[in-house]
Image (cartoon, rainbow, N blue to C red):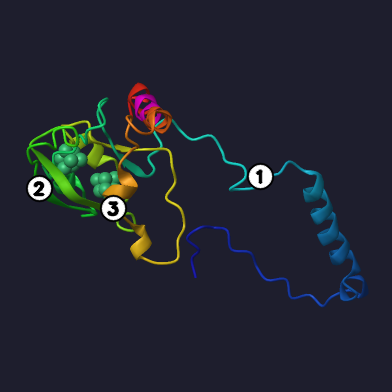
Amino acid sequence: MQSLTQRAQPVDRRPMTWVEKIYLWNIFRGMLITLVHLFSKKVTINYPEQTRPFSPVFRGLHILNRDEEGRERCTACGLCAVACPAEAITMEAAERLPGEEKLYREEKYAARYEINMLRCIFCGLCEEACPKDAIYLTETIAPANYSRRSFIYGKEDLLIPDPNTQPAEYAKARGQIDKKKKAGA
Ligand code: SF4
Ligand code: SF4
């Protein structure tokens, strides 16, 4: 039969010599290989205690952005959901009521906003589609979990901290966004 790869080796069917029969040489060779690997440079790291540097364009978990006054930027226009090839985003829009101007930037806001991280392929199209600077993918890796429900991230999981109540945490989250913008990701 003609070989496609030309890498086929004929099987050696000669009877074993007495040295081969006691397997000592093969055991010694195996241990020598182990010994060499003990002192060679490690190719693995102790994750999660150690992590490798991420590419500036790495895309991880999403965040929903607020403006400098702490108002939610998302206006529930649905463009991110339409752009999402995995149909991972769902939302429900609501109208802003008088007195809620400090909570929501626009007249309409997302009363419910969910991303199913089991569907998400972290393509970043939702971020590109958003006209309101409201959604970003961060450097955070989605943590492992035991149930499917825990991979559905709601608005409370995605919204960045309010600058009025948690200025340091807000600045940290904004830092991730600014870094992303700088990298042009
Ligand atoms: S990153 Fe891609 S797959 Fe994930 S929610 Fe956004 S558009 Fe959908
Ligand atoms: S995140 Fe952006 S694109 Fe998605 S609904 Fe909100 S404003 Fe629209």
The answer to which image quadrant residue 107 occupies is top left
Whether the residue under disc 1 has CB within 8 Å of ligand 1: no
- Asked if one can make out residue 103 in the rendered structure from this viewpoint, the answer is yes
- For disc 3, the neighbor class at 10 Å (few under 14, some 14 to 19, many from 20) is some
* Label located before the other in sequence (1 or 3): 1
Residue 45 appears at what percent x and percent y?
64, 45
Side (left or right) of 153 relative to 103: right
**Residue 138 image offset from top left, x and y in percent:** 38, 38
Front-most of residues 144 and 15: 144
Q: Amino acid at mark 2?
A: Ala
What kind of element bears circle 3?
loop
Magenta span includes 89:
no
The amino acid type, in three-letter code, at marker 3 is Gly
Is residue 76 visible in the rendered image? The answer is no
Q: Is residue 20 above or below residue 98?
A: below
x and y percentages locating residue 68 in the rendered image: 27, 25
| Magenta highlight range | 174-179
Which residue matches tag 3?
154
The circle drawn on residue 94 is 2
Name the residue type under label 1: Val
Which label sits on residue 43? 1
Q: Earlier in the sequence, mark 2 or mark 3?
A: 2
Q: Nearer the viewer, mark 2 or mark 3?
A: 2
The quadrant of the picture occupied by the C terminus is: top left
Residue drawn at 78 percent across, 75 percent down: 14
How far, Cα to Cα, is label 1 from label 3?
38 Å
